[in-house]
Every structure is written in structure tokens, then in C-alpha cells.
Image (tube, rainbow, N blue to C red):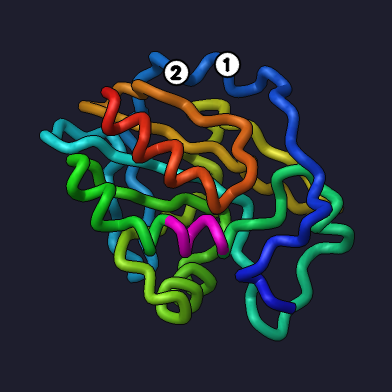
Amino acid sequence: MNFNNLPRDLPIPKDDGTANHLEGSFVPDIELPNQDGNYLKLSRKDSFRLVLFCYPMTGIPNKPSPEKWDLIPGARGCTPQNCSFRDNYDDLIINNSIPVGLTTQSVDEIKEMTLRLKIPYDVLSDANFKFIKALKIPTFKVDKTIFVKRITFIIQNSYIEKVFYPIFPPDRNVKDVINWLKEN
């Protein structure tokens, strides 16, 4: 399966209202491991903005995706989203922001993906749902596995300035983020 290409007939996610409470919130004082197992604090007082994009899971070569994955609105497209943030990394930096990915996948799975796709930014594992539960970030369930829904935050000094939700298509999200950063 080619994870880089999005099928034309993907279902479009609808705004279900489950993210309405997030804009204007403060980020909790939580640290999560990145692809190298190093902990990154998400509540920060920096001069730059943090662009935190959450996604369900990137596909793993030679491992099948969950059954009917492409039929779940917003599930497919994590690899193209990560690649679009990679490909626009310099534009994000120029606009005084740092991208950081977040998923519930394990550190080992994230490490494989960041090496394979040559990702230049941190991707965090919230496998224990500490951050997701603290902020009540929307999730969905497939069989017995819970995944975070695709959502992007622009955070300044631990304050969530902007929320992008729902996101479609996933590879377009970075352009929307850059446009917002330029205007704000």
C-alpha cells in the first residue's frame, strides 16, 4: 500500500463540535517522549509558536492498516500530512513557528516513520493518552483501539490561539497553518 497517496473518494470529516472547547485553552504541564525517547514539554514560554498537529497513525510498511481504515472520515492521510509539514518546514520556521507531531503510536513506530520519511521535527508519542485526556482532544475507536482525531493547534506561551478541526484534506493543513501564521 502506498501511504503517500490519498484516494480520491475519501470521506470528508464533519465538525462534530468535540473540539469547540479547545481554542483559548491553556496547554497542561505535560511532557511526552519524542521519536528518540527524549521528553518534550508542551507547556512552554518561548518566543516562537508551537504548531502541534495530532494525527491517528502513520502506516507501517508490511503491516496492514485497521480494517476499513479508508472509510473512516479523517483516518487516512497521516503520511501525506507529515510529509507536507516536512516539505514546508522552512516556511514554518520563517513564520516563527516550530512544527511538532503527536500520535498515540509507540516511540519505536514513530522512530521508524521519522527515519523513513526524513522528518526534521519532533513527533511525540501520547500512547498513554496523558495530553489527549487532559485537554479532552477528540478521539475515535476502531475495534478496541482508540486513535486521536486529526487536529492542529497553534500555541503561543502555552495558550491555544487557533484550532484547525476538522482537517481535510490532510496534506493541505500545513498551507492553512502557514496562511494563518502570516496573517496573525
Most foreground residue, 18 or 37? 18
Secondary structure mostly taken by the magenta-highlighted segment of the chain: helix
Residue corresponding to mark 1: 20
Specify whether 151 is left or right of 15: left
Residue at 38% in and 62% down: 86
Kindly identify the amino acid type of the residue bearing the numbered disc 2: Glu
Quarter of the image holding residue 66? Answer: bottom right
Specify whether 77 is left or right of 8: left
Specify whether 37 is left or right of 111: left
Most foreground residue, 105 or 97? 97
Residue at 65% in and 82% down: 61
Specify whether 168 is left or right of 42: right
Q: Is 15 placed above or below 68 here?
A: above
Q: Tell me which segment is drawn in magenta.
A: 80-84
Which quadrant holds the C terminus? Answer: top left
Tell me the element at label 2.
loop
- x, y percent for residue 147: 67, 48
Q: Is 153 placed above or below 65 here?
A: above
Number of the label disc, if any, that sits on residue 23: 2
Tag 1: Cα neighbours inside 10 Å, few (<14), some, or many (≥20)?
few
Quarter of the image holding residue 76? Answer: bottom right
Per the model, the C-alpha gap separating discs 2 and 1 is: 7 Å
Residue at 87% in and 63% down: 67
- x, y percent for residue 80: 56, 61
Residue at 78% in and 75% down: 64
